[in-house]
């Protein structure tokens, strides 16, 4: 059985999560920004609930992470999920925002980066999300690069995603991850997936075909003292993908609309995802939900394999 570190004393863990970690049973972390800023209500809560159920179906404990009333919570109740989805006072909280939101006693929906950091502090080694943040288009001029990438060099957590979000510069994102020494492992494919689409045009740096292979990489990486996470890129199911040529035109239109409105910074991704839902007639939302569920199945299996080691 793989040993995990003790949770940080300032974290608030549910009894279910605390007991599982203490016993060395598998736990999977889940972000909360997708609930408050990534999907419309009520689909967001329905998705979050179903994803937790999928993980439990594999005998693994889900731990959705957020800041509530200034406290970092590892594991949420159904009432907490409703609050995150419906309250107007939930901040989008990355790592840099955690001290501010917590000191103010506020609510914060954690991004990929913040969820990674809090999961690592709790001793959770596997985290499931939809898409990874990365290098934004035009970054050579704007310097707009997601904190998700720097966090992957710092926190010892394996992040299961459907690649990086299609709205980003995938080639530059892969270069940035290589520079940071982050293993990028495509699951069951030689090509790096592109969130809504199974194909990106970029070869995956590494490939794994079983959860056990990924769990072995996790153990070896951290046993060698190599700090930081891994990105497991899991393609959206073929039946649910939006082909590259179709989604590319939709993304271009959404980017043009965003530029016309002057939306920038941390508001860019929520705006773009929402606009893409509108332009696609809801097809992107259906694909987003499908890929998160698919990632939950894989993440739970990886967590179980890692705990068994």
Image (cartoon, rainbow, N blue to C red):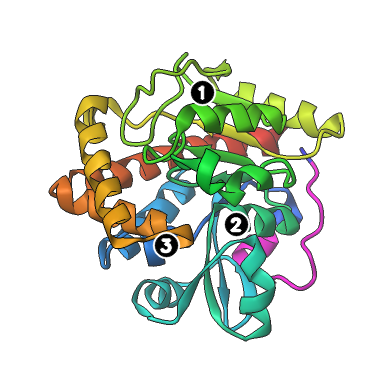
Relative height, residue 14 to residue 120 (above, below): below
Q: CA–CA distance between discs 2 and 1?
A: 22 Å
Looking at the rendered structure, the secondary structure element under dot 2 is: helix
Decide if residue 144 is in sight here.
no
> Which comes before the other along the chain, label 3 or label 1?
1
Nearest to viewer (mark 3 / mark 1)? 3
Judge by depth and name the residue closer to the eye, 285 or 124: 285
Q: In which quadrant will I find the C terminus?
A: top right
Which image quadrant for residue 261? bottom left
What residue is disc 3 on? 267
Residue ID at (56%, 65%): 75
Q: Is residue 11 magenta?
A: yes
Residue 40 seen in render: yes
Q: Could you tell me which secondary element the residue under label 1 belongs to?
A: strand
Measured along the vertical axis of the image, is residue 18 above or below residue 79? above
Residue that carries the numbered disc 2 in the rendered image: 115
Q: Which residue is at a point 68% across and 31% down the rendered structure image?
A: 182
Residue 266's spot in the image, x, y percent? 48, 60
Q: Is residue 150 left or right of residue 261?
A: right
Tag shown at residue 186: 1
Relative depth, front residue between 97 and 71: 97
Tell me if mark 1 has few (under 14), some (14-19) or many (20+) residues whose alpha carbon lies within 10 angstroms of its own: many
Residue 289 marker: none
- Distance from Cα at disc 2 to Cα at disc 3: 18 Å
Expressed as whole percent of the image width and height from the top left, the position of residue 46 reads: 30, 61
Q: Quadrant of the N terminus?
A: top right
What's drawn in magenta, residue-wise? 3-19
Q: Are marks 2 and 3 in contact (CB under 8 Å)?
A: no
Q: Is the Cβ of the residue at disc 2 closer than 8 Å to that at disc 1? A: no
């Amino acid at each position: 059985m793989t040993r995990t570190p003790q949770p940080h004393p300032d974290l608030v863990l549910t009894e279910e999560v605390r007991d599982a970690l203490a016993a060395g049973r598998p736990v999977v972390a889940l972000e909360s920004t997708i609930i408050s800023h990534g999907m419309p209500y009520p689909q967001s809560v329905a998705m979050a609930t179903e994803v937790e159920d999928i993980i439990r179906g594999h005998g693994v404990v889900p731990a959705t992470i957020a800041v509530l009333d200034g406290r970092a919570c590892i594991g949420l109740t159904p009432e907490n999920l409703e609050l995150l989805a419906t309250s107007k006072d939930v901040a989008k909280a990355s790592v840099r925002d955690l001290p501010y939101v917590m000191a103010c006693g506020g609510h914060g929906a954690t991004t990929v980066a913040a969820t990674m950091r809090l999961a690592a502090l709790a001793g959770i080694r596997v985290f499931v999300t939809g898409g990874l943040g990365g290098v934004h288009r035009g970054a050579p001029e704007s310097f707009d690069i997601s904190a998700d990438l720097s966090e992957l060099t710092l926190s010892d957590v394996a992040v299961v995603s459907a690649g990086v979000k299609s709205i980003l510069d995938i080639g530059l994102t892969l270069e940035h991850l290589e520079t940071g020494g982050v293993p990028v492992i495509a699951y069951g494919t030689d090509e790096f997936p592109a969130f809504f689409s199974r194909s990106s045009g970029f070869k995956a740096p590494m490939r794994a075909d079983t959860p056990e292979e990924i769990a072995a990489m996790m153990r070896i990486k951290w046993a060698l003292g190599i700090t930081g996470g891994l990105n497991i890129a899991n393609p959206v199911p073929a039946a649910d993908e939006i082909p590259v040529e179709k989604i590319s035109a939709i993304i271009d239109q959404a980017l043009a609309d965003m530029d016309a409105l002057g939306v920038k910074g941390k508001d860019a991704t929520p705006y773009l995802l929402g606009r893409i839902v509108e332009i696609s007639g809801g097809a992107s939302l259906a694909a987003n939900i499908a890929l998160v569920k698919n990632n939950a199945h894989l993440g739970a299996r990886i967590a179980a394999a890692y705990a068994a080691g």
